Amino acid sequence: MADIPWQGDACGLVEEFRAGRRSPIDELRATYDAIDRSHLNAFCHLPRDEAEQAARDADVSLPFGGVPMGVKELDQVAGWPDTEACVVFADRVATHTSFMVDRLRRRGGAVLVGQTTASEFGGVNLTRTVLHGSTHNPWQHGRTPGGSSGGSAAAVAGGLVPIATGGDGGGSIRIPAGFTGLVGLKATFGRIPRGPRAENGNYTVTVGPLARSVRDVARWFDVCNGHDPRDQFSLPRVDGWEQGLGSITESLRGARVVFAPDWGGATVAPSMWALLDEFGSHLARELGWQRVEIDTSLPSMGAAWSISGMISIATELGDAWPGCADVLTPEMRAGLEHAPQRYGVEARAKIERRRMELNHRMAEIFDPATGVDFVITASNPDVAFDADGPLPAEFGGIRAGAGNNGRLTFPANLHGNPAISIPAGTLDGLPVGLQVVGRHFAEQALLEVALTAERSRPWPLVAPMAPV
């Protein structure tokens, strides 16, 4: 039996299973032992008997056959809690399983270890709730792994499971990936179908993995992508994600790129940007890119995104609000108190107008004739902040505001672009993520960029102190 969980990537663990050097059932037991010892607070539900049966029955010929996998608290699994990380729904149980999780289990052969903690309703970029408390960053206890997919990031970077599910409606894959030294790809809107029974909300949410390696991300999309008629926005299936790795490097030569430290109106700590500028320049040399200067300014959309999102949350809470105010996190409570006052016919029209303006600007920036192929920016404005919050008002000594973090990631969600967070080193002992944003449907190119980074400057697959 393995003493500790596998510290490599998920693809490597499958190879170990197939070679008979490790077994799914022993791996699962090592995983649960590590979770029981851990102080990260990365998991909030552990269906041990169900997972043990799945491990015994695992078909290791499948892409993720026997791999212990974490499932984000906001993803549904029939029979598991369906809480939205909120005390109000603490006793609610899911009646269905999400498309992505179902495909990972049936097509991929993954063993679902349990639910990873998330921020309440996925609404903020740290994982601290009344229901489950604070989740910690495995690189430094007391720092946040980000949010809303913070538990997944902590579990993967913390050496507990090799891969876990995430979702990204405003940065919730890329932000925690950047804070914990993982690969996080937000795909083109609709690449993996959402649902069943998913509401569209802001039309910004995509789902995908928090992963240790580029090939793990590629294999995930091989398993999970493809249209389902119950999600009218889901895209047709594309094959060959993992097989295609390394095959299009030459086609990226000559690509036009712009470095945008103030992307979305954000303010990035100077010490962090110095590191990211050097890392991005390294990739530009490796890939033969042309670095150009163009206007990357965007219309402000953060407040509109937040207001409309809060309206959706208020609708879900229904008659429970405002009586439930005292059991909500401070950020959700404040948002719900203020959003209805600012939302009406005029505000709705303004939101739609702003989105149209942003779509127009993004199209200009990525215009094949006059724009760029990639925007290089930060995944976060600074290293991870306190696990207990509050959301920081300053980054690197610069007054930034609590919405600063999301400004770097919102644009790709609002326009539906793919964007990836790539581990780019450390600052003060904490991970730094480089974000690369591409045109719609350019996921394979972004994976190629990440592969170049992975090969030329390998990153640690787990935090130095893992497993906790």
Image (cartoon, helix red, strand yellow):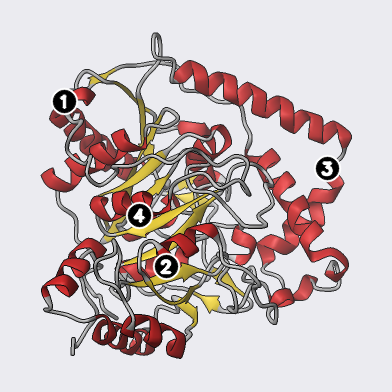
Tell me the SS state at disc 1: helix
Lower sequence index among marks 2 and 4: 2
Q: What type is the residue that disc 4 sits on?
A: Trp
The residue closer to the viewer here, 199 or 422, is: 199
Q: Which mark is nearer the camera, 4 or 1?
A: 4
Label 4 environment density (alpha carbons within 10 Å; few <14, some 14–19, many ≥20): many
Label 3 environment density (alpha carbons within 10 Å; few <14, some 14–19, many ≥20): some
Lower sequence index among marks 4 and 1: 4
Q: Which residue is mark 2?
A: 105
Q: Which residue is mark 1?
A: 250
Please give the label number shown on residue 220: 4
Lower sequence index among marks 1 and 3: 1
Alpha-carbon span between mark 2 and mark 4: 11 Å
Q: What type is the residue that disc 2 sits on?
A: Arg
Q: Which mark is nearer the camera, 2 or 4?
A: 2
Lower sequence index among marks 1 and 2: 2
Please give the label number shown on residue 343: 3
* Residue 326 to residue 358: above or below: below
The residue closer to the viewer here, 52 or 317, is: 52
